[in-house]
Image: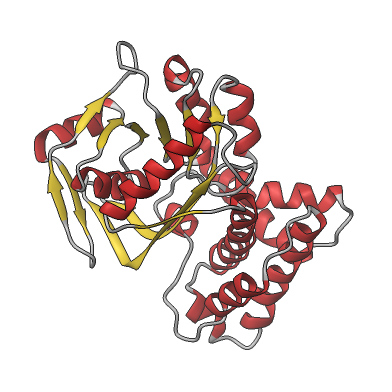
């Protein structure tokens, strides 16, 4: 089974690196600068669960590259159009595309742009960042990846074999990867959680714990969380009780140092996924005529940041 990871940043570098460590046939499609880093020092992952330092196969173009069985897209949403251009030549019949982007809106985009491929759902729960020197730094013990056919079950023998093969490869890599029967519901659960987490920590420019230390901090976070739940429910994806309880606990954990990666993007003066996450959630609220004032405030803050950043 040939696997192409598009991107070797935080998520792609971590999970792709774990598969390489286990002997899987993995190639990374990366930009020229990242290819130079990987050629020089290899893929370096620093993790509480065990470091990785090894050479990896890289390409900067799919031209002449043998068609892979699975393409894992591990990029930011604002880079998706360019990524789809870069892989269109190898995402043909029988190829499974597994995006690990945040949010939901990208699924339709990928299906439209790659009509011959089969698009699965996927998500990653992990705290990870790519350092300027090319090291992938894993920030905690969480490294869960969920994936699966969006129909709930494979539609062909080949798709079933690929699903089982990928699950086996991750099991050999000791990564917490799960083949899920309702992956879109899982994705919506994370979408709800991430909107609340990113909206609150970016608006306040602070961790969950710091926000909760203020008198109005917890009510604001829970209001935003409740708004996103109502929107998801209107879309037909109400969070499961256990999932809801887990995410609520994370958002109300006293002393938590948790922030959204979107806040780290703001602190670095970089473009964010604001429109792909909060903007999409807000559009769905408007479609269903759901009042979401906390969401609107958080989104307006992020839009103002992007306006100021792009006009410097």
Q: Quadrant of residue 197?
A: bottom right
Quadrant housing the N terminus: top left
Q: Depth check: give the residue in front, 274 or 116.
A: 116
In percent of width and height, residue 201 lies at: 54, 67
* x 68%, y 69%: residue: 225
Q: Please tell me how many numbered marks the rendered image carries.
A: 0
Residue 112 visible at all? yes
Q: Residue furthest top?
A: 64
* x 45%, y 79%: residue: 256
In percent of width and height, residue 279 lies at: 68, 48
Q: Going by the image, does 248 lie left or right of 35?
A: right
Q: Going by the image, does 164 lie left or right of 311?
A: left
Residue 304 visible at all? no
Looking at the picture, the colour scheme in use is: secondary structure
Q: Depth check: give the residue in front, 187 or 129.
A: 187
Q: Which residue lies furthest to the right in this view?
A: 289
Q: In which quarter of the image is residue 12?
A: top left
In percent of width and height, residue 265 lies at: 44, 52
* x 23%, y 65%: residue: 49
* x 58%, y 72%: residue: 247
Q: Residue furthest front?
A: 157
In percent of width and height, residue 238 lies at: 74, 62
Q: Quadrant of residue 71?
A: top left
Q: Going by the image, does 168 lie left or right of 102?
A: left
Above or below, comparing residue 75 to residue 51 in the picture:
above
């Amino acid at each position: 089974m040939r696997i192409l990871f598009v991107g070797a940043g935080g998520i792609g570098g971590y999970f792709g690196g774990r598969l390489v460590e286990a002997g899987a046939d993995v190639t990374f499609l990366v930009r020229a600068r990242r290819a130079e880093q990987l050629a020089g020092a290899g893929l370096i992952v620093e993790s509480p669960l065990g470091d990785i330092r090894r050479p990896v196969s890289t390409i900067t173009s799919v031209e002449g590259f043998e068609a892979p069985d699975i393409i894992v897209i591990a990029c930011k949403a604002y880079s998706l159009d360019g990524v789809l251009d870069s892989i269109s030549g190898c995402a043909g019949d029988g190829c499974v595309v597994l995006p690990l982007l945040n949010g939901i809106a990208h699924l339709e985009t990928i299906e439209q742009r790659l009509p011959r491929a089969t698009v699965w759902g996927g998500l990653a729960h992990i705290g990870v960042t790519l350092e300027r020197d090319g090291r992938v730094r894993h920030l905690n013990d969480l490294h869960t990846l969920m994936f699966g056919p969006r129909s709930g079950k494979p539609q062909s023998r080949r798709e079933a074999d690929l699903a089982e093969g990928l699950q086996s490869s991750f099991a050999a890599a000791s990564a917490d990867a799960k083949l899920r029967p309702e992956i879109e519901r899982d994705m919506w659960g994370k979408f709800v959680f991430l909107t609340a987490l990113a909206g609150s920590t970016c608006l306040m420019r602070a961790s969950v714990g710091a926000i909760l230390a203020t008198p109005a901090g917890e009510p604001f976070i829970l209001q935003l969380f409740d708004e996103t739940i109502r929107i998801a429910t209107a879309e037909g994806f109400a969070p499961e009780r256990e999932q809801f309880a887990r995410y609520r606990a994370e958002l109300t954990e006293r002393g938590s140092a948790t922030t959204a990666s979107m806040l780290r993007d703001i602190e670095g003066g970089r473009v964010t996924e604001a429109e792909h996450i909060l903007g999409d959630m807000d559009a769905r609220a408007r479609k269903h005529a759901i009042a979401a004032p906390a969401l609107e405030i958080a989104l307006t803050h992020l839009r103002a940041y992007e306006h100021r950043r792009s006009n410097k």
